[in-house]
Amino acid sequence: MRRLRLALTKGRLEKKSVELFEKMGLDCSEIINKGRRLILPVGDYDAVLAKAADVITYVEHGVCDIGIVGKDTIAESSGEFYEVMDLEIGKCNFALATKKGTDFFGGYNVKRVATKYPAVASAYFESKGMDVQIIKIEGSVELAPLLELTDAIVDIVETGSTLKENGLEVVETIMPISARVIVNVASLKLRKAEIEDFLKALEDAKKK
């Protein structure tokens, strides 16, 4: 049987995940000095480095057993997997923001909202019973209201400094975001003991 595979989101979450693995007592020397390699041994496991959306794809299809990915990516996905733990790292929020002084909720016209996260934005406005036009933007969503393409944006906000610098302000926080652990549905049945041991060690490392 192959070793358990852990899909890690490349970048900041990867670094924070490795810090937790070191607290678990796993040998992380290969992943710290990874070069251009994308599959690396971490203790008795194999780590796969991928973009956030691909972490979900690999876990959902069972080529990786466990994934570490932001709640933002999970909320935008419609994949089948178990979300089993909040690692409480990489904390920020989804927020609705507008140009300063805008009365977003006033008036009767259909508002336009720019976002990289149409599923999250749609669910939020549906919960408010609002009919909005959502425009998907790939780059800096802050540009959309500045160019008067949209009335507001739904985006990830950490410190709010980018919003302030562009004359925008948070109107409402939509949901908190942090890194979560996800597990493949079949893996949790077939390799339950191994996965539970890993999760227990990870939970203990979180507290150190």
Image (cartoon, rainbow, N blue to C red):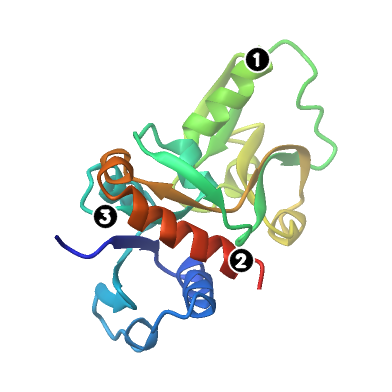
> Mark 3 and mark 1: span between their CA atoms?
39 Å
The residue type indicated by label 3 comes to Cys
Q: Which residue is mark 2?
A: 206
| Label 3, residues with CA under 10 Å away: few <14, some 14-19, many ≥20 | many
Q: Which mark is residue 172?
A: none
In the depicted structure, whether residue 169 falls above or below residue 38:
above
Q: Nearer the viewer, mark 1 or mark 2?
A: 2
Which is nearer the eye, 179 or 86?
A: 86
Q: Nearer the viewer, mark 2 or mark 3?
A: 2
The residue type indicated by label 2 comes to Lys
In the depicted structure, whether residue 140 falls above or below residue 16:
above
**Is residue 186 rendered to the left or right of residue 164?**
left
Q: For the point 34% across and 57% down, which residue is it?
A: 194
The residue type indicated by label 1 comes to Met
Provide the secondary structure element on which disc 3 rests: loop
Q: For the point 22% across and 65% down, which residue is it?
A: 3
**Is residue 111 rendered to the left or right of residue 65?**
right
Q: Which mark is residue 64?
A: 3
Residue 94, percent from left and from top: 64, 43
| Label 1, residues with CA under 10 Å away: few <14, some 14-19, many ≥20 | few
Provide the secondary structure element on which disc 2 rests: helix
